[in-house]
Image: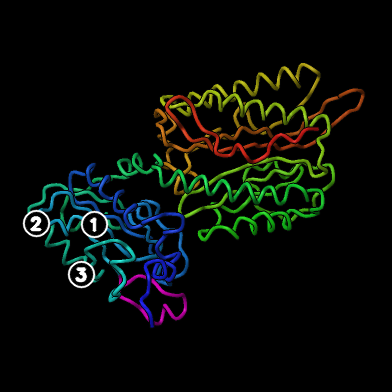
Amino acid sequence: MGKVGKNDILKIYSQVFLSEGLENAQKVYAKRRQEHLKKLDSLCIYAAAQNENYERICQNPEFLYLTGINQSGPILVLDPLTKNKNEREILFLPKKDAKKEFWNGIKLGLPDAQANEVTGFETILPLSQFNSWFKKRIVNFKKHIFSNETIRRKLLRYKVNVKDISKIHLEQRVVLERERIALAKKAQEIAKDAFLKILPRISKYKNERVLSADLECFMLQHTGTGLAFPSIVAAGKNACTLHYSKKDCDIEKGDLILLDFGCRYNAVCCDISRTVPASGKFNPLQKLLYSVVLDTQKFHERNVKAGSTLKELGGLAWLFLERTLEERFTKRGGKMKRRYLGKPHGISHLIGDIVHEGALNRDYLKKPLRPGMLISNEPGLYGHFELEINGVFYSEDIGIRIEDDLLITENGCINLSAGIPKEFGD
């Protein structure tokens, strides 16, 4: 048997160690850890998601960002204070389990002769040694930092000071470096190609489920890490439900179809929305309302730049939408019923290793944008609308959302989704 090359080893561990789209993936993750170590003032512990069944998991983004390891069980230790260079980064791996691997495939564990080469870690220890290692390491420590709530509770019995470093980590993770910007662009290309494949046949789809299956299938053909989220395919009045998930209704010829879709490439997500006429042509009311949303999206994109905040930008964009709706619709005698006042949802959120990146309380909305951040741009309009146009009365439940992904620069932004059609003529 010939020598097994590095690429062959990585293929064996695909989905376990994320290297797709990255050259020298081990060095990329090591660089992230080194940058993170510079921000720490004491011992830091990251735990992977826990799943005893070895099934495919949704990994903790903090752990995945620093290791590239997409399996349950391991623990990462970063220690900026140790004098021993080999203990600054330690990966604890669980014991190999041949029975579980028979059911669910190969995983990283000990003993594993390839673990160091696959992960790029010099120091890998058995997970069973973590408790004894920790007890020894905390001697004479006055302050300690932990990132995982489960570990936080477990380790309080050792009478150490515990600090949440999620904000420190998040500040680093939400700014995409060169490698992740390239991954984000690749995700956009995959989503674009999928949309371009379904667009010419849009009038042939008779059911939301079939359209969703095709759209997702075209994306999954080109990425090993799957969808960014379950796609939304909502026809007619279903598009008035923001996170519509049923996807089993028939599509009528006069419907608008709202598509909200995206994929992961490696760990980086894209998030795209398009609203298209099922017949291939807008009716006059649909066209009018669509223009309101599209012009709002363009307005928002022109305003986005480093130093501004999403809270301020969002307020301006929604105000623009309402004023434009008043001018083009209400003043012409249009009537509408909406289940919200002015703002149905945020116009922007951060995108990165998870599709809605950032802290759960959305603190980032009030913080200045920085170059390298990736945000959504997704104005929407939802409700029942009535208007007479050229002697014809239109009355319809309509949901419209148009979403692009914007990469923040010093002087503005780059629309990574610019190649995905959103202007469909009449």
Residue, disc 3: 129
Residue, disc 1: 77
Which residue is at a point 79% across and 53% down the rendered structure image?
Answer: 205
Q: Quadrant of residue 152?
A: bottom left
Of the residues shown, which amino acid type is indicated by label 3?
Gln
Picture coordinates of residue 210 (x, y %)?
A: 73, 58
* Chain part drawn in magenta: 94-109
Q: Is residue 338 magenta?
A: no
Residue, disc 2: 139
For the C terminus, give its image quadrant. top right
Picture coordinates of residue 161 (x, y %)?
A: 18, 48
Q: Nearer the viewer, residue 319 or 118?
A: 118
Of the residues shown, which amino acid type is indicated by label 2?
Val
From the viewer's perspective, tell me whether residue 390 is left or right of residue 163: right
For the view shown, which residue lies furthest in the front direction?
2
For the N terminus, give its image quadrant. bottom left
Of the residues shown, which amino acid type is indicated by label 1?
Val
